Image (cartoon, coloured by chain):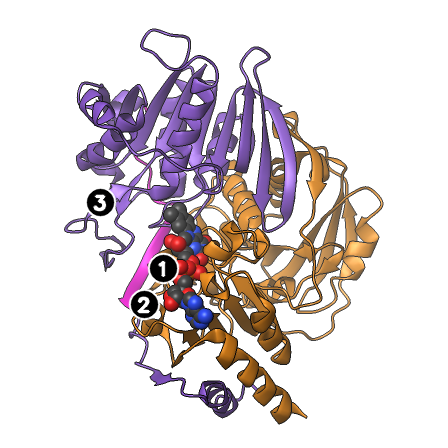
Chain colours: A purple, B orange
Amino acid sequence: MKIAVCVKQVPDSWAEKKMVNGVLDREGVDAVLNDLDEYAVEEALRIVEAHGGNEEGGAHSVTIVSMGPERATEAIRKALSMGANDAILVSDAALAGSDALATSKVLAEVIKSGGFDLVICGTESTDARMSVVPAMLAQRLGWAQLTFASSVSVDPGANTVSITRTTEAGVDAINSKFPAVISVVEKINEPRYPSFKGIMASKKKTIDSRDLATVGVSAESAWSLVADSAPRPPRAAGVKITDEGNGGNDLVKFLAEKKFI
Amino acid sequence: MSQVLILADFAGDKCTKTTAELATAAARNGSVTAIVLAAPGAGATLAASVKHGPIASVLVVESADFATYGVAAASDAIAQVIAQKSPTALFVASHAYGKEVAGRVAVATDSGIITDAVDVSADLTATQLVFGGSTTVHSKVSKGVAIITVRPNSIEADLSDSTPAVENLSLTISDSAKLATTTSSTPPVKGGRPELTEAQIVVSGGRGTNGDFGAVEGFADSLNAAVGASRAATDAGWYPHSHQVGQTGKTVSPQLYVACGISGAIQHRAGMQTSKTIAVVNKDPEAPIFDLADFGVVGDLFAVLPQATQGVTAQKS
Ligand SMILES: Cc1cc2nc3c(=O)[nH]c(=O)nc-3n(C[C@H](O)[C@H](O)[C@H](O)COP(=O)(O)OP(=O)(O)OC[C@H]3O[C@@H](n4cnc5c(N)ncnc54)[C@H](O)[C@@H]3O)c2cc1C
């Protein structure tokens, strides 16, 4: 069983983000592995571990696939130190400012050529928050879409996978044959911390860097364009009172002034 | 006149207010056709509930495949409708299902996509609030059909009555959309309270409730508000996951958000910080949620909320 896990390097959640020339300014902010992708890495590792593990040269492997600048190797190392086998990073100046359509196109091309059975993603990146790449990948690859999984079970003998999909629309049981694109919600597991051994081992693991020509995709003109962006005025400082027996009444007074009652 | 498609949004067999919001934005750009995807025999009932907002026509597609093949089947049908009708735009509600459908349709029709718009102008310029609501972005799709997902409760809906013409369309769902099979579906339990993403007022409880949502629910009911919860509360099993507000729950932007016993973690803020007015009840004066508060009470929610509930009830009578 060959599993690909798609990960993205994103600005740290608490970092102040701003737009420069219509794209997120990624320079000068701390960059981390998108935390929702850690659940995807963890789930992939649990799947292979449940079926004999991912020893080098064995039947199962977990490959990290990412698109981003060269420095995204830092985020990829974290995924490798959790226990993934190797990684592919697509880096190309022509990809700067790519949207979900471009990203899914590049990722799909890499996955197509890799002979994978399953692709696992997080549900969204914490910077762009579009939550569409897994569905786009399924459409581009023509593979089964099993997304928003709160549990996954795989039968490598029968080449089948079943998930529980949990969204605001309820809970669904969904299954398919391989190959499939899965996305996992954060309730599915508790990602492991990389062990010291894992961190040391990750330094020797291969990150295969590819440019667009190697992947075989040409850079496309954008599907959408940002006209302008502007910081919103910060929220005006509010009123803060301490309850000394009248806090509830004070709250009611505020709500009445604002015409909520 | 150009034609704009919207995907009608339903809760059970009732059309949601979100549908009228989509129609309101879509009508600025052309004549609005609402697509209704239904199980065989259910189309007429669903179509009949699409009766508010500037909707010129309803297009009903019936197929058993929508229940069995979910997002993939819906996307396949919509891409076929787009090929037939050549609309200028497609508007869909911004929730997990809506965004996934929009994403697949964008790929299938080689069109641009903008998600989580809070407004769309007459020239299809979408407004988004990004980076936790700190930045406003205006953007436009530059290729194909403008596919835009619109955040519920952001656009003031024209709720006037409409009597759209109903057209039935029969389509065959492609085999490539039938790869993942849904074997069972359990809809979320609906309480008597307003829907979280549609409510004017949301009152949320966190770990500070210590598992007792009585005070939060009582205050919510006095204001006819929806009840939300932090992840700490849903993880503990105190409140259903479908009520979670935040990055991995729902995004809400009501007129008023009241956070009770919630510290204000970045992942919680991601789901509520574009609320128009924010009130906070928290016993820790240093809790980061106070940074967002228009009105904050430092105090015990079990004392403050019952008093406030009484006060609201007294004012209303
Ligand atoms: C990948 C990921 C995704 C996440 N997604 C979400 C999400 O979607 N939504 C979300 O909410 N969180 C999410 N979280 C979790 C988030 O980081 C916080 O852990 C969570 O929001 C904390 O919930 P809380 O504020 O209720 O609890 P706490 O942080 O424990 O805060 C409890 C607050 O209650 C106050 N309090 C206690 N007792 C009382 C009392 N009697 N009266 C008044 N105040 C009282 C305390 O002062 C404290 O400020 C996510 C985390 C991760 C890692």
Where disc 3 sits, the SS reads: strand
Residue at the (33%, 56%) spot, across then down:
A226
Residue identifier under label 2: B288
Instruction: Mark yes or no: residue B76 visible.
Output: yes
Question: Is the residue A238 above or below the residue B128 in the image?
Answer: below
- Asked if the residue under mark 2 is in contact with the one under mark 1, i.e. CB atoms within 8 Å, the reply is yes
Instruction: Mark yes or no: residue B27 visible.
Output: no
Question: Any atom of ligand 1 within 8 Å of the CB at mark 1?
Answer: yes
Residue identifier under label 1: B265
Specify the quadrant of the image occupied by residue A111. top left
- Report the front residue among B159 and B267: B267
- Quarter in which the C terminus of chain A is drawn: bottom right
Give how far apart the Cα atoms at labels 1 and 2 are: 7 Å
Where disc 2 sits, the SS reads: helix
Q: Which residues are magenta?
A: A216-231
Q: Is residue B173 left or right of residue A168?
A: right
Looking at the picture, how far across and down is residue B8, in whole percent?
Answer: 66, 56
The type of residue carrying mark 1 is Ala
Where disc 1 sits, the SS reads: loop
Question: Is the residue B169 above or below the residue B123 in the image?
Answer: above
The type of residue carrying mark 2 is Pro
Letter of the chain that mark 2 sits on in the rendering: B
Q: Residues within 10 Å of mark 3 (few under 14, many from 20)?
A: some
Q: Residues within 10 Å of mark 2 (few under 14, many from 20)?
A: some
The type of residue carrying mark 3 is Ala
Looking at the picture, how far across and down is residue B160, in whole percent?
Answer: 69, 75
Residue identifier under label 3: A31
Q: Quadrant of ligand 1?
A: bottom left
Specify the quadrant of the image occupied by residue A241. bottom left
Question: Is the residue A148 above or below the residue A204 in the image?
Answer: below
